[in-house]
């Protein structure tokens, strides 16, 4: 039986595994303990600023490096608290 590849990503600084190459913003939000819709969700990739992720956005977890997601209070500037 072939072992299915798992894809890794981080939420805040905690590593998680996902069974599929793609994950949506709403699926990231559903990973325990969960990120409420009252918070903005961002993705940070090496060498790029944080990018807002909508619930319907699909993120490719097979890109080089590990995807890092973080949340902030809605209406704040990315990367600033």
Image (cartoon, rainbow, N blue to C red):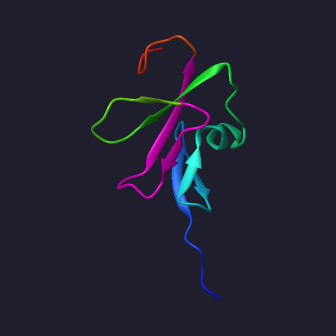
- Front position in the image: 49 or 11: 49
Q: Is residue 69 left or right of residue 46?
A: right
User: Above or below — where is 47 with respect to 74?
Assistant: below
Q: Which residues are magenta?
A: 54-73
Percent x, y for residue 45? 37, 41
Q: Is residue 61 magenta?
A: yes
Q: Is residue 34 left or right of residue 41?
A: right
Q: Residue furthest top?
A: 75
- Front position in the image: 55 or 10: 55
Percent x, y for residue 53? 52, 32
Q: Is residue 33 left or right of residue 61?
A: right
Which of the image's four quarters has the N terminus?
bottom right
User: Above or below — where is 72 with respect to 6?
Assistant: above
Q: Is residue 69 magenta?
A: yes
Percent x, y for residue 5? 55, 71
Please give the name of the residue rendered at 60% of the width and 37% of the height, measured from the top-left corner.
Answer: 56
Q: Residue furthest bottom?
A: 1
In the picture, residue 64 is in which quadrant? bottom left
User: Above or below — where is 64 with respect to 71?
Assistant: below
State the count of labels: 0
Percent x, y for residue 67? 45, 46
Please give the name of the residue rendered at 65% of the width and 38% of the height, measured from the top-left corner.
Answer: 26
Please give the name of the residue rendered at 53% of the width and 45% of the height, measured from the top-left corner.
Answer: 58
Q: Residue furthest front?
A: 56
Q: Is residue 9 left or right of residue 50?
A: right
Please give the name of the residue rendered at 44% of the width and 14% of the height, measured from the top-left corner.
Answer: 77
């Amino acid at each position: 039986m072939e072992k299915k590849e798992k894809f890794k990503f981080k939420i805040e600084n905690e590593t998680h595994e996902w069974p599929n190459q793609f994950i949506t913003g709403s699926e990231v939000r559903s990973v325990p303990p969960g990120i409420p819709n009252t918070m903005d969700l961002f993705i940070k990739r090496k060498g790029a600023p944080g990018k807002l992720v909508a619930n319907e956005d699909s993120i490719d977890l097979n890109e080089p490096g590990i995807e890092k997601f973080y949340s902030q209070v809605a209406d704040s500037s990315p990367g600033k608290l």
